[in-house]
Image (spheres, rainbow, N blue to C red):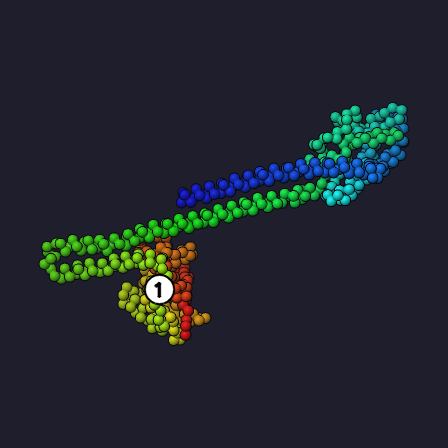
Amino acid sequence: MKNKNTVLILGITSILILISVQVFIILGVWNQKNELFAIRYTILSQEALYNIWKGRSTDGFDTVRLLLDQYSEQSVKDLHTINDKKELADRKKDILAYFTKVVNQEQDLSGLLSQYFESRGFDKNFNYKIIINSVEMIDVDTVVVYQKEGFSNHKSPDRGRRNPPPDISSSSILVRGGTQLEGNNYRFNFDYYIDFSNKQKVILKETSASLGWSTLSILLVGIMFMITYRNLMEERRLSNLKTDFINNMTHELKTPLSTITVAGKTLEMPQIRNDDAKILETAKLIGKQSVHLNQLINMILEISMWERTQFQLDKKTVDIEEVMNDVVDSFKSGGGNNAVIYKKYNFSGAKLDLDVVYFTTLLNNLLSNAVKYSDKQPVIDIEGFTQNNNICIKVSDNGIGINKFDQKHIFDKFYRASTGNIHKFKGLGLGLYYVKKIAEAHGGDVSVNSKPGKGSTFTVTLPDIS
Ligand code: ADP
């Protein structure tokens, strides 16, 4: 059990490490693609600005210029006539709001850029944002209306800047940094950013191949691990079954052997040697136990023979009802005489190609199990009928029953249900294995239906030839 957990933990840990490495690699690829995307669109935007200027002789802010020219003429006069400080501050605020509105609503650059991107086969779905750095009104002298913190008109335009300011999405691309627009009575400076709404989708599309391969490799490793783990567990189960079998076999062999040893010792006693009746009784006992011992050894030999060769069936066409009656009668007169057996046959004279010896083993195994796995007076119902060109034989008992898990395994070689003391019911876990093998060798099958505490029904189907 400890080993099983270690294998499981090791396997899951390796898969988790693999997943982490893959996630790490994918994140790296993702970041790289992100950077590339920004570089690609920065270069493309610069190229677009140049071509728009060359082709259309516009930078996309012509309407803005016109409107601001008209607006500034009056505004600059206002600024010179207002004396009240608060009123002046309010007026400046209004001017800034107007500039912000006009530059955002009336610019044509976004439309021109998106046309350009589309014509070059690139993504054209972007949002833009314009950040005003400064607004100055110019008359005889210059009045500063607004100046963003840290901004200076004397600094060179911030074109190479990569990282957008905090009020802008980090994935935004700076297309025009420190753009200066001037009219007769104003001068203002702004940054123009674009941000692609489809960016994640575009990158996802580009990384989908590596993402797909990584997922596939993780899945493959997972599946391979599961298969290996299952095989390992199956091997362990078989090896456990074999160990159980050896333990049971040893136990089974010891019983007749110790009886024979005791009988031998008894025969050595002088008082026994003079008693013919006792000698005969002991000799019979030795004989019986030897037969039993022989049967057990034959069984072991048979297992290895069945393993190596296919069944050699000696089939004869028989009347199934007759054969069944013979087997059940001899079973009753043998070990099963304490069981109540009910028979209900409806074979309508069906004929079967059968190896009678093997079939006897099959039915005997089912009957002796029905008696063996019972904690009260065994009552066995044997039903026989034909169905869809098959012969069905049902053997039902009122025994201890079999739980769902064991039902799946009872036909496996060496399998014994694990509930309770394994030696309470003697056996080697081979009876039902033989039943299944024999049924299959005849082209049929066997199944079980059982409820713990209520009893079990075994159904054997064999192909009918009549
Ligand atoms: P064995 O009887 O030697 O253990 P079998 O192959 O005949 O081996 O049976 C396998 C297991 O199936 C048994 O250990 C027992 O737990 C269960 N079993 C078989 N027949 C019955 C039955 N009629 N009622 C309850 N349990 C049964």
> In the image, what residue type sits under mark 1?
Gln
How many numbered dots are placed on residues in this image? 1
Disc 1 crowd rating (10 Å Cα; few below 14, some 14-19, many 20+) is: few
Residue 110 position in % (x across, y down):
78, 40
* Residue at far bottom of view: 349
Residue 379 can be seen in this image:
no
Query: Label 1, on which residue?
Result: 312
Q: Quadrant of residue 128?
A: top right
Q: Is mark 1 within 8 Å of ligand 1?
A: no
Q: Quadrant of the C terminus?
A: bottom left
Q: Residue at x 33, y 58 (%)?
A: 305
Asked whether, in this view, residue 97 is left or right of residue 447, the answer is: right
- Residue at horizontal 79%, vertical 24%? 154
What is the x, y in percent for residue 215?
57, 45
Quarter of the image holding residue 179? Answer: top right
Query: Residue visible at 53% across and 47% down?
Result: 220
Note whether 121 is above or below 93 in the view shown. below
Left or right: where 269 falls relative to 68 = left
**Foreground of the two, 119 or 459:** 119
Relative to residue 173, is residue 21 drawn left or right?
left
Tell me the quadrant of the picture where the N terminus can be found. Answer: top left
Residue 451 in view of the camera: yes
Determine the residue positioned at 26% across, 54% down: 253
Question: Is 460 placed left or right of 213 in the picture?
Answer: left
Secondary structure at numbered mark 1: loop
* Residue 458 locus on image (x, y percent): 39, 63
Q: Which percent across, then down, holds residue 124? A: 74, 43
